[in-house]
Amino acid sequence: MSEVILEVENLKKYFPVTNGKLFGRTNYLKAVNDISFTIEKGKTLGLIGESGCGKSTVGKTIIGLNNITDGVIKFKGKDIGSLNNKEMKPLRKDIQMIFQDPYSSLDPKKKIGYSVKEPLDIHNIGEEGERQDKARQLLEMVGLSYYYMNRYPHEFSGGQRQRINIARALTLDPELIICDEPTSALDVSIQAQVLNIFKQLQEKFDLTYLFISHNLSVVKYLSDDIAIMYLGKIVEIGDVKEIYKNPLHPYTKALFSAIPTEDPNIIKDRINLKGEIPSPLNPPSGCKFHNRCPHKMKVCEEVDPNLINVDVNHKVGCHLYK
Amino acid sequence: MEEKLLEVKDLKTYFHTSSGVVKAVDGVSFSIDRGKTLGIVGESGSGKSVTASTIMGLIPSPPGKVEGGEIIFEGNDILKIHKEELLNIRGKDIAMIFQDPMTALNPVFTVGYQITEAILAHRDISKKDAKKIAINALEMVGIPDAKSRYKCYPHEFSGGMRQRAVIAMAIVCDPKLLIADEPTTALDVTIQAQILDLMKELQKKLNTSILIITHDLGVIWEVSDYVMVMYAGRTVEYTETKTLYKNAKHPYTWGLLDSIPKLESDSDKMLNTIEGNPPDLRSTGKGCNFAGRCPYAKDICKKSPPKLVEVEPKHFVACYFQTEDTSLGKGGQIKNE
């Protein structure tokens, strides 16, 4: 039994939305509404969903960029959700994040050697020479020569910048890396290079990833477990191969069927969903998916289904399975 | 007998910048038959959008300039015809759908106004009739309650609905050719599936030819009959979609096909990648543009650019190994094993 590194229990993150009037009513945008999952050491959990489903908010809340509204986040058994900035600082070493846009996530005025070693300065680790050495080693590990250290971000392509971001995330030897759509701004041939780096580094350092993406093929390639989110809730979670072979939730099925075919000779049977995702400010009652679901029953309008176990490592939140 | 609607021959569009001449499109040839779909696939900077903009006559000049080639639309070279004649073709016979539905619509006018504007620009009919046609088009692209939606502003529409409105605007004048530049890139997969289905349906109904530009091979497999692969401003391979999937010939196409993570494939293996980065478009054109990243490159590849040759019926490849030295045919077979 391997060690559980991240445990999220009943996490909620609501954003207040006012209507602009002084004594107007405050509404809450329930970006993340009661989700739970765990990640074991050295494993990858893929978090999938369409825009607006709250997947990025989950990542940001875990790393402390958002305050939590309710729930518990445990990192190696320690509750980190309620820590203040000062208490959180030593833990930031262990949890790092890689963002989607490689263009805005590097300081354009700093040489990349500086950007990569800066985390060591902040946490006051080692001497200047050692820091430089470490930055050089990291850049070489992600396939960039040491002489790039004195260049500025604008001299690099998107794929190279994303490598620099990966190197910087590794500077402090983290245990958990939250990757928020790290390849969606890249071309396919460059995406493949970056995905391979993720895989190699995981094997080398026994890293744990929370991999957030909307691209199912990418998530399938990297993940051990996947969780599918819809309107702030996890609708299905479990072993990636099992879910891919046997998706149960109607939304998961529709999502899988919407992926463009991988072979022009095979025409997929597509489950066409009606309409689009409702606004999270005004979500439907009961099951959040009921107004688009092809298998809607009466109970779906009234009761929000809980996640239930259907297999050893496969949970689904749908009234069809009971 | 299939009839050619559009034929592009050896098109070259360069941009003259202060740091040199950027050869954005440097020798692209293809044709589209009536009622068929051609997909152009390539990575960022391969010149696929510039090709589309050149056909539409949307290249800003300066710095852009069409340096050579022909664009023959229904028998006329549209690079040579008068500007006023081009206005009659553009928007009417050739319509375009852009990538970003957020910026393709004007935020201060209603969706309905913008669609009728397109109709009135090309047809001599009353505003009332134009409104009827516009509402009809909105219904055709699947916008519910089109009559009241006609009066909405773009911000009241979601991304998928905006893209539907943009498609409605493009089809109101019954175009013969529809150019779609990354029409689904900004959309989620379930919405992408809806839009692709809509485009296929409209094509059947209106017998429109479609030129679809994308970086996503999955989209190509879904909608197109023919596919052209572009790399650094040139056509590297051009054939039927199914042939490209089964029997690609260019090393770049192999790399592209292999580098996509597949749902069926074994995730324990590393992905095959194309090493390196695309070349700087200011310094291309001396040899094969892919030579710097090609694992099979020889001396000749760096000296002169390979020509696009028909290696088997309806299959064009620009690669020395497929046209002169056939030894790599075996390489292709190794790939398939």
Image (tube, coloured by chain):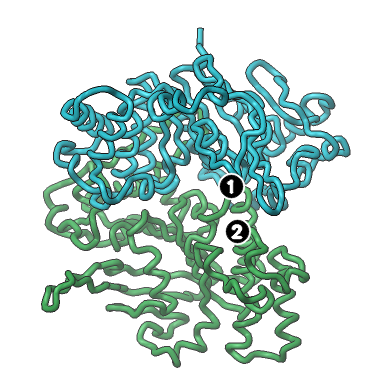
Chain colours: A green, B cyan
Q: Is residue B281 shown left or right of residue A47?
A: right
- At x 65%, y 80%, the residue is A117
Q: Residues within 10 Å of mark 2 (few under 14, many from 20)?
A: some
Q: Can you identify the residue that label 2 sits on?
A: A158
- Residue A102: quarter of image: bottom right
**Percent position of residue A66, x then y:** 37, 77
Q: Nearer the viewer, residue A233 or A130?
A: A130
The verdict on a common chain for dots 1 and 2 is no
Q: Is residue A109 above or below residue B15?
A: below
Between B235 and A67, the one lying in front of the other is B235
Towards the viewer: A278 or A4: A278
Q: What is the number of the mark on residue B44?
A: 1
Q: Is residue A292 above or below residue B254?
A: below
Q: Position of residue B234 (x, y in %)?
A: 67, 35
Q: Is residue B290 left or right of residue B170?
A: right
Mark 1 → mark 2, Cα distance in angstroms: 10 Å
Helix or strand or loop: what does disc 2 sit on? helix
Q: What amino acid type should be assigned to the residue bearing mark 1? A: Ser
Q: Amino acid at mark 2?
A: Gly
Instruction: Give coordinates of residue B232: x percent, y percent.
Output: 67, 42
Work out whether residue A175 can be spotted: yes
At 28% across and 39% down in the image, what residue appears? B114
Q: Chain of mark 2?
A: A
* Vertical position of residue A87 compared to residue A203: above or below: below
Q: Are marks 1 and 2 in contact (CB under 8 Å)?
A: yes
Assess disc 1: are there few (<14), some (14-19) or many (≥20) residues with their C-alpha within 10 Å of its C-alpha.
Answer: some
